[in-house]
C-alpha cells in the first residue's frame, strides 16, 4: 500500500504530518517520493499566481475542457477566477480545490488553476546516463541508469535492471565515487526498475557511478560487496 495521496498533497503544501508510518513509508518508497515531487511542483506553480493581477471568470467551454481532462464533474462553477489579466473588473481572490486525475491528489492552489496547461508535467531534462555492465558472477545481467532534472530542480535517477533470478534478498541501488570508497544508498529496486530521488548535497561530479547490488536479508545497511551491475554516468 502506498501513502494516501491526500496526505502527500498536504506535505507538498508544507503541512506538518505526524503519522510516523506515512513518513517511514515515504522514506523508503521511490514511487511516493516522485509523486510528492510532482505535487510540490504543482503547489509551487499555484503559489506563483499570488501576484498575477486581476482575475476573471473563464468561458464555460474552458471549464468544460478542464473538467474533461481531470475526469471530474462537468458543472461549471458560478464564479471561478482562473486567468489573470490587467484592466478587467476586480474579482475577489479565492482558494480553489483542484482534483488531479490518476494518482495526483486533491490540492489547493492559490489563485485557482491559472492555466491547465501550466500544471501539465514538463519534460524532465536528462543530465547524464550510463550503461550498467555485469560483474563476472552475474553474467547475462544488464542495466541502464539516467539522471533527470525536473523544472523545479528535483534530481532523480531512473534505473532498470535485467538479471537472472537470484533467490532471497533484494536489489539495492547506490551512487558511489569512482574509487568506490564513498557511497550512498538510493533505495530498493523492485520489479527490475525504479525512480529514486538524489539526496540534497550529493555532487554528481563526484558520485558519478551507479551500482546495483544483491543484498541479503541480514539487517545490515552496508553494501554487501556483491554488485550485480555498475556503470559510470556521462
Image: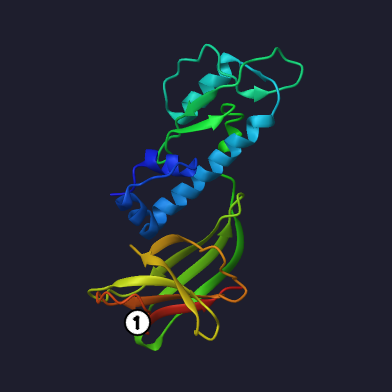
**Residue at point 52% right, 44% down?**
40
Residue 177 image position (x, y, % from top left): 54, 80
Question: Who's the residue at 59% across and 27% down the image?
Answer: 111
Q: Quadrant location of the C terminus?
A: bottom right
Residue at (57, 73) in percent of width and height = 233
Q: Is residue 88 above or below residue 173?
A: above
Is 108 placed left or right of 204 in the picture? left
- Pick the residue in front: 14 or 171: 14
Left or right: 155, with 84 as reference point: left
Callout 1: few (<14), some (14-19), or many (20+) C-alpha neighbours within 10 Å?
A: few
Query: What count of labels does the image hold?
Result: 1
Q: Residue furthest right?
A: 87
The image position of residue 19, as x and y in percent, is 32, 47
* Residue 137, horizontal then vertical, whole percent: 35, 87
Q: Please say if 104 is above or below 220.
A: above
Left or right, 56 with reference to 18 = right
Q: Secondary structure at mark 1?
A: loop
Residue beneath the point at 58% across and 53% down: 150
Would you identify the image quadrant in which residue 47 lies?
top right
Residue bearing mark 1: 224
Name the residue furthest left.
Answer: 168
In the displayed structure image, the side of residue 24 where residue 59 appears, left or right: right
163 or 199, which is in the foreground? 199
Query: What kind of colouring is applied to the model shown?
Result: rainbow
- The correct choice, above or below, for 21 with respect to 93 in the image is below
Amino acid at each position: 500500500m502506498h501513502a494516501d495521496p491526500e496526505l502527500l498533497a498536504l506535505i507538498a503544501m508544507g503541512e506538518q504530518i505526524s503519522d510516523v508510518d506515512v513518513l517511514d513509508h515515504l522514506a523508503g518508497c521511490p514511487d511516493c517520493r516522485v509523486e510528492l515531487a510532482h505535487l510540490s511542483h504543482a503547489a509551487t506553480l499555484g503559489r506563483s499566481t499570488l501576484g498575477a493581477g486581476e482575475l476573471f471568470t473563464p468561458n464555460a467551454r474552458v471549464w468544460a475542457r478542464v473538467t474533461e481532462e481531470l475526469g471530474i464533474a462537468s458543472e461549471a462553477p458560478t464564479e471561478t477566477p482562473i486567468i489573470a489579466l490587467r484592466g478587467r473588473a476586480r474579482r475577489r481572490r479565492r482558494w480553489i480545490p483542484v482534483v488531479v486525475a490518476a494518482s495526483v491528489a486533491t490540492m489547493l492552489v492559490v489563485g485557482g488553476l491559472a492555466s491547465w496547461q501550466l500544471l501539465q508535467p514538463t519534460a524532465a531534462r536528462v543530465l547524464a546516463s550510463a550503461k550498467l555492465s555485469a560483474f563476472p558472477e552475474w553474467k547475462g545481467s544488464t542495466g541502464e541508469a539516467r539522471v533527470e532534472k525536473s523544472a523545479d530542480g528535483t534530481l532523480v535517477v531512473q534505473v532498470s535492471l535485467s538479471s537472472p533470478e537470484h533467490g532471497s534478498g533484494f536489489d539495492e541501488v547506490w551512487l558511489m565515487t569512482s574509487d568506490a570508497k564513498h557511497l550512498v544508498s538510493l533505495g530498493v529496486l523492485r520489479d527490475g526498475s525504479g525512480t529514486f530521488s538524489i539526496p540534497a548535497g550529493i555532487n554528481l561530479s563526484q558520485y558519478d557511478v551507479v551500482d546495483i547490488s544483491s543484498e541479503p536479508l541480514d539487517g545490515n545497511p552496508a553494501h554487501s560487496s556483491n554488485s550485480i551491475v555498475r556503470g559510470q554516468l556521462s
